[in-house]
Image (tube, grey):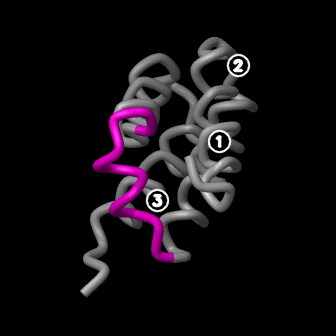
Amino acid sequence: MNPPFFAHKVVLDAMRAHPDSPDVQVEGCRALEMFAVSGDHDVLLVKPEFNAHIAILTAMTRHINDADVQDEGCMALANLTVSGT
């Protein structure tokens, strides 16, 4: 894995390791949102070791009544769908 994507993996690993923590999920979604805005949306979606969309949807499903998780999750998903071209 290229060093620039190490932070992506750390964030996703934290989200997967702490699925019951809404705080971890909010901050994880927020970080993924920023990574996607920086142009890494293709990497976050395509590389199987990332599958960021699955981590985000899992967080949103697990914390369905947490407005902060829902808000940050929606923003992260929206930014992941932006085309790089």
Q: Earlier in the sequence, mark 3 or mark 1?
A: 1
* 46 drawn magenta: yes
Q: Magenta segment, which residues?
A: 39-50
- How many circles with numbers are drawn on the protein? 3
* 18 drawn magenta: no
Q: CA distance from mark 2 to mark 1?
A: 11 Å
Q: Residues within 10 Å of mark 3 (few under 14, many from 20)?
A: some
Amino acid on which the number 3 mark rests in the picture: Met
Amino acid on which the number 1 mark rests in the picture: Gly
Q: Secondary structure at mark 3?
A: helix
Quadrant containing the C terminus in the rendered view: bottom left
Q: Is residue 28 above or below residue 21?
A: below
Q: CA distance from mark 3 to mark 1?
A: 12 Å
> Relative to residue 73, is residue 46 drawn left or right?
left
Q: Residues within 10 Å of mark 2 (few under 14, many from 20)?
A: few
Q: Which residue is mark 3?
A: 75
Q: Which residue is mark 2?
A: 21
